[in-house]
Amino acid sequence: MTKSALTRWSTEELETAILSRSLDNVQMYEAERILRERELAPDRKLARRIYNSVAWTLAFAVGTFVVALGIFWLIATGYRLH
């Protein structure tokens, strides 16, 4: 059985195979690695969502700051809108 074949197994099938000791050592290690990766996947998605949210918030804040600086510069130089 190849490593890629184990990735096609469901989580339940992998857990059952590990508990029943029906895999050899290499397959057992690979199955445990696959299960660890699957456990971390939701955490990675959450981290990506948080990162994206923070990036957009920072971009908005910096944009607002730049616009405010522009307005202050226009006021300071005496520019008038006619």
Image: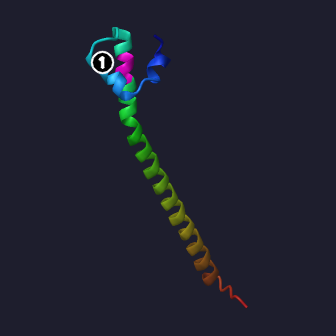
- Location of residue 16 in the rendering, given as x and y in whole percent from the top left corner: 30, 21
Q: Dot 1, how many residues are within 10 Å of its Cα: few (below 14), some (14-19), or many (20+)?
A: some
Q: Mark 1 points at which residue?
A: 18
Eyeballing the image, is 17 above or below 56? above
Question: As shown in the figure, which amino acid type bears the numbered disc 1?
Answer: Ile
- Location of residue 25 in the rendering, given as x and y in whole percent from the top left corner: 33, 9
- Could you tell me which residue is drawn at 30 percent across and 18 percent down? 18
What is the span of residues highlighted in magenta in the rendered image? 29-33
The residue positioned farthest toward the left in the image shown: 19
Looking at the image, which is closer to me, 4 or 68?
4
The residue positioned farthest toward the right in the image shown: 82
In the image, is 20 to the left or to the right of 54?
left
The mark tally for this picture is: 1
In the image, is 67 to the left or to the right of 29?
right
Eyeballing the image, is 54 above or below 47? below
Looking at the image, which is closer to me, 78 or 9?
9
- Could you tell me which residue is drawn at 50 percent across and 55 percent down? 55
- Could you tell me which residue is drawn at 65 percent across and 86 percent down? 78
Quarter holding the C terminus is bottom right
Magenta stretch: dominant secondary structure: helix
Which secondary structure lies at badge 1?
helix
- Could you tell me which residue is drawn at 64 percent across and 80 percent down? 74
- Is 8 in the magenta? no
The colouring scheme, among rainbow, by chain, secondary structure or one colour, is rainbow
- Location of residue 53 in the rendering, given as x and y in whole percent from the top left corner: 47, 56
The residue positioned farthest toward the bottom in the image shown: 82
Eyeballing the image, is 12 above or below 27? below
